[in-house]
Amino acid sequence: MNLFDGGKAPNPRRVRIFLAEKGINVPIVPIDMGAMEHRGHIVTSRNPLARLPVLELDDGTVLSESVAICRYFEELQPEPVLFGRGALGKAQVEMWQRRLELNLFFPVAQAFRHIHPAMRDWEVPQVPEWGEANKQKAVDFLVLLDAELALREFAAGDAFSIADITGLVAVDFMKPARLSVPDELTNVTRWHQALKARPSASA
């Protein structure tokens, strides 16, 4: 199998962190997104949406979407569990993974894509007002998350999960999106620093 990877881009990074937590090594095919290689045949022939990451299995089956790829590897190698244990645990991880993806990861990405000058040729048309609106959406969700993290160590409970990976990548992506975690959100800061200290964060 091969993992077509986009380097520093947030979604490919989510998969690399997940694989690092699992201790799984997959051959990497680097794709230079800065040179628009993700819009070339090598990617679009496998994913017509021209997005990364893309996992190609030995039989030619192709998986895209970062969380779907992570689910595939969770089934292949259940330990350590990153999608929750039991009916309730799995549901809680799914809930917080979706909350973090839709209410933090997505707004931060929209702020970056619609405001950053480097994205002018990528996001057509850029709508700066939409980018600015999403900045506040991200901060509003962090306030909610801070209250939740006062009650537990990780996003979905007492164990590290895919939800934390999404949260780590989203908060790290705030810097290029010209956002920052408000100083008063001490629980989010504690959580983020603990996630950054994990060896997988450098994957």
Image (tube, rainbow, N blue to C red):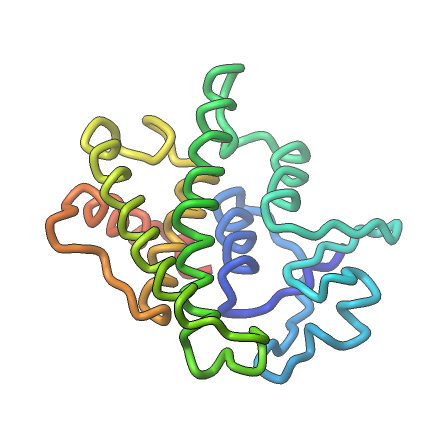
Quadrant into which the N terminus falls: bottom right
User: Residue 149 location in percent, x, y?
Assistant: 24, 34
- Kindly identify the residue that appears in the image at 49 percent across and 61 percent down: 10
Q: Nearer the viewer, residue 187 or 129?
A: 129
- Kindly identify the residue that appears in the image at 47 percent across and 46 percent down: 101
- Kindly identify the residue that appears in the image at 84 percent across and 66 percent down: 45
User: Residue 52 location in percent, x, y?
Assistant: 64, 62
Q: How many marks?
A: 0
Q: Nearer the viewer, residue 44 or 26?
A: 44
User: Residue 62 location in percent, x, y?
Assistant: 79, 52
**Within the image, what quadrant is residue 122 found in?**
bottom right
Q: Is residue 153 above or below residue 70?
A: above
Q: Nearer the viewer, residue 33 or 120?
A: 120
**Within the image, what quadrant is residue 48 found in?**
bottom right
Residue positioned most to the right? 59
Q: Is residue 45 above or below residue 17?
A: below
